[in-house]
Image: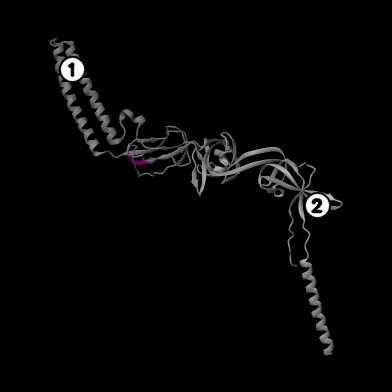
Amino acid sequence: MKKYRKLIIATIIALIFIGTFVFLWQKSQPKEIVYSEFTPTMNEVKKTTVITGKIEPRNEVNVKPQISGIITEIYKEAGQYVQQGEVIAKVKVIPDMGQLSNAEARVRLADINLQQAQVDYDREKNLYNQKLVSADEYDKVKKALNQAKEEVVAAQDALQVVRDGVSKSNASASSTLVRSTISGVILDIPVKVGNSVILSNTFNDGTTIASVANMKDLIFRGNIDETEVGQLVLGIPMKITIGALQDLKFDAALEYISPKATESNGANQFEIKAAVTVPADSVSGKSGKLRSGYSANAEIVLAQVEKALTIPESAIEFSGDSTFVYLVKDEKGVKAYERHQVVTGLSDGVNIEIKKGLSAKDKVRGPQIVADNKEE
């Protein structure tokens, strides 16, 4: 019994050894190399680039007050449309004490001068009625009285302007009312009721009451690499895609290329601007409003060939300044590959134009097909 058991064990070990040897021998045998094959086809080839940037109004205006004071009323809010001249906010004047004292003194002095001019006029009129003074002397005194009256009115107006920011004579054009200088959408109102504001002067830009822009006149602003800027020309069409509105695409035309580069992450970039064509229903439609500062991508076609004989670029062998392909040949039932020089043209990164060296009847070898090894 023991003799048979040993024989069985030896047989099993021998079978395992032989199976392992056969397996390793099969694995060591060279596998047949299989390549993909392509036939040249007629296609449109485009070389494009994508520029990241943002959408913004061409002109954004900061509305500032004409006087310094405190905001007492705000009549509009961000997102509303305003016409030129429409009131956005109201300012209450906080008068300067020095200017107020001078204005009050001017009113008092004007009153005194008016009283004296009235006395002189009454006296001169009485003498004129008695024909004791000439008409010329009478006219001079009358003129002085009228001037004194006008000075009183002017002094009172000046006092009202200093104290209240508005007078009775210019109430319709009150400087206490902050009006929009253009028609457009209010992008931002950075002040609140109770905030102090100052007017623009030589030493200060003044407080911005509101930012207003025409959202129907938009531009795309972005940066392009120096390796591609030389292929751009003014007026070249662009397709704009806004990140927040993926379903919408807008046409644009390049209108500005910066003459000076700026360095960004170690690369030279040139700023570009393009005028965006905005459909009316995109400003305030179901798709939502276009907003200033939206991130956007601009696709530009740098070069294009409409009808080109193309093959996948992966089938091209680059050797110095020359390019080659491997033509598929069938010699007596045996497949062979012949190295053949071609002249290439435009490439879109996937397909490449063949200008010379191939026809639509040729078959070209592509990359090697690598089979997946799976263990069962």
- SS of the residue at dot 1? helix
Please report the bounds of the magenta region as a residue range: 68-72
Secondary structure of the residue carrying tag 2 is strand
Task: Say which residue label 2 marks.
Answer: 336
Q: Is residue 69 in the magenta section?
A: yes
Q: Do we see residue 106 in this rendering?
A: yes
In the rendered structure, the answer to whether residue 43 lies left or right of residue 94 reads right
Q: Which residue occupies 73% across, 58% down?
A: 370
Give the x, y percent position of residue 8. 83, 83
195 vs 7: above or below: above
**Quadrant holding the N terminus:** bottom right
Amino acid type, label 1? Val
Q: How many marks?
A: 2
Q: Which image quadrant for residue 148? A: top left
Q: Residues within 10 Å of mark 1 (few under 14, many from 20)?
A: many
**Is residue 353 left or right of 197 when viewed as pictured?**
right
